[in-house]
Image (cartoon, rainbow, N blue to C red):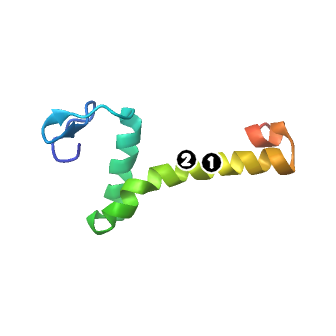
Amino acid sequence: MMRSRSWLVPLLDGLPYIDKPVLFHWLQALFIRILGKRSSRFGSRAPVQAVALFGVTRWVGGEFFDDETANGAP
């Protein structure tokens, strides 16, 4: 996406690659841009790890406290 400047349709070898929502690819591109190309392996996995962290945090909030805490209610 960064090379082709095609921000709405991800491409793989010049062909549309629509296997995941485009937001996921945007997050990957953002993390790779922030972390640099040398750490692109970590950068491409960072969005998955971030979503997993949110899920685990929500689960722990529900287990140790209550549903309002897990859902982020004030």
State whether residue 39 is above or below residue 65.
below
Residue 38 place in picture, x, y as percent: 28, 69
Q: Amino acid at mark 2?
A: Val
Do callouts 2 and 1 mark residues in contact (Cβ within 8 Å)? yes
Q: How many marks?
A: 2
Q: Residue furthest bottom?
A: 38
Q: Amino acid at mark 1?
A: Phe
Q: Residue at 20% of width from left, 37% of height from top?
A: 11
**Residue to which mark 2 is pinned:** 51
Circle 2 sits in a helix, a strand or a loop, which is it?
A: helix
Circle 1 sits in a helix, a strand or a loop, which is it?
A: helix
Residue 7 place in picture, x, y as percent: 26, 35
Q: Residue furthest left?
A: 14
- Locate the C terminus by quadrant: top right
Image quadrant in which you'd find residue 5? top left
Residue 10 place in picture, x, y as percent: 25, 36
Q: Residue at 33% of width from left, 67% of height from top?
A: 39
Answer left or right for 52 relative to 44.
Answer: right
**Residue to which mark 1 is pinned:** 54
